[in-house]
Image: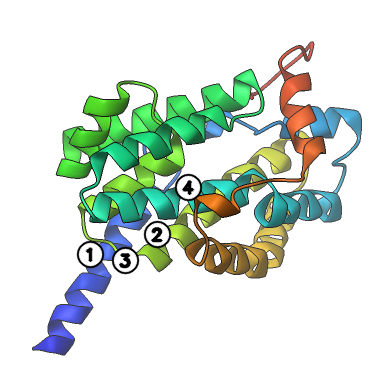
């Protein structure tokens, strides 16, 4: 019986994560490049190696790392039904955005994610988050709250979120550099280790560990705001 229950739980976890973090989930992730568009135009990113190095740095010491920590902390707050702490984490996540477009990126995706969950996969955690945060919801906080609200274990949630994060940026890189689809897959292979390590580090961290040192990526987000020709919103 225990084995059957564990199998069912695992299947439910995988089903929800594959649904929520797939490109078809209505958050508009494909519209954002996270500053990658400017990095390509400036020559910082020009091939497979420079793309994977840039994304590895985001995971180790940039926004990917911070997002994973914020997601984990939101998950813990929602699991404890500490709704005020969840709202405070959301406010902090938005305040950490280093540029207007980075703020737009996380807030729009977070609002869309929470709305889709509330409509199709309702749970108390998302309802409480929407009541307290309104329409300004950071994307990783929304994912953490929904995952806790549905009882999903933290480890696969963080790993799946980070995979979705890099997969979307690899897709942007394939279009912008441009690269072939095979090189896109090579990038995902190269990022498997960094994603796993970033997930493990995030789970062991708390809000006191937040911080980033990838200034070039933040500058890219700022520069993209005035880039003359653009395919992406960030």
Give the mark toward the camera: 1 or 2: 2
Query: Given the current orientation, which residue lies at the most extreme left position?
Result: 1
Name the element at disc 3: loop
Position of the N terminus, as image quadrant, is bottom left
Q: Earlier in the sequence, mark 3 or mark 1?
A: 1
Name the element at disc 1: helix
**Callout 4 touching callout 2 (CB < 8 Å):** no
Give the mark toward the camera: 1 or 4: 4
Name the element at disc 2: helix
**Callout 3 touching callout 2 (CB < 8 Å):** yes
User: Alpha carbon of mark 4 to alpha carbon of mark 2: how far?
Assistant: 12 Å
User: Alpha carbon of mark 1 to alpha carbon of mark 2: how far?
Assistant: 12 Å
Mark 3 highlights which residue? 153
Mark 1 highlights which residue? 12
Instruction: Compare residues 137 and 36 and report the one nearer the observer.
Output: 137
Name the element at disc 4: helix
User: Alpha carbon of mark 3 to alpha carbon of mark 1: how far?
Assistant: 11 Å
């Amino acid at each position: 019986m225990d084995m059957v229950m564990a199998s069912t739980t695992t299947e439910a976890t995988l089903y929800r994560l594959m649904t929520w973090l797939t490109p078809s989930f209505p958050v508009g992730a494909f519209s954002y490049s996270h500053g990658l568009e400017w990095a390509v135009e400036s020559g910082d990113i020009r091939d497979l190696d420079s793309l994977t190095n840039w994304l590895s740095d985001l995971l180790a010491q940039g926004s990917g790392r911070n997002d994973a920590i914020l997601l984990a902390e939101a998950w813990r707050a929602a699991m404890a039904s500490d709704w005020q702490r969840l709202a405070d984490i959301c406010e902090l996540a938005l305040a950490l955005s280093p540029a207007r477009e980075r703020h737009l990126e996380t807030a729009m995706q977070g609002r869309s994610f929470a709305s889709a969950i509330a409509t199709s996969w309702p749970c108390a955690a998302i309802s409480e988050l929407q009541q307290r945060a309104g329409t300004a919801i950071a994307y990783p906080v929304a994912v953490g709250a929904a995952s806790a609200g549905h009882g999903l274990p933290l480890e696969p949630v963080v790993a799946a979120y980070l995979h979705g994060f890099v997969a979307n940026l690899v897709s942007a890189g394939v279009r912008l550099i441009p690269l072939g689809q095979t090189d896109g897959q090579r990038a995902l292979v190269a990022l498997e280790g960094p994603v796993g390590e970033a997930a493990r580090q995030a789970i062991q961290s708390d809000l006191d560990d937040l911080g980033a040192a990838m200034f070039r990526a933040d500058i890219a987000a700022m520069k993209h705001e005035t880039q003359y020709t653009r395919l992406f919103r960030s």
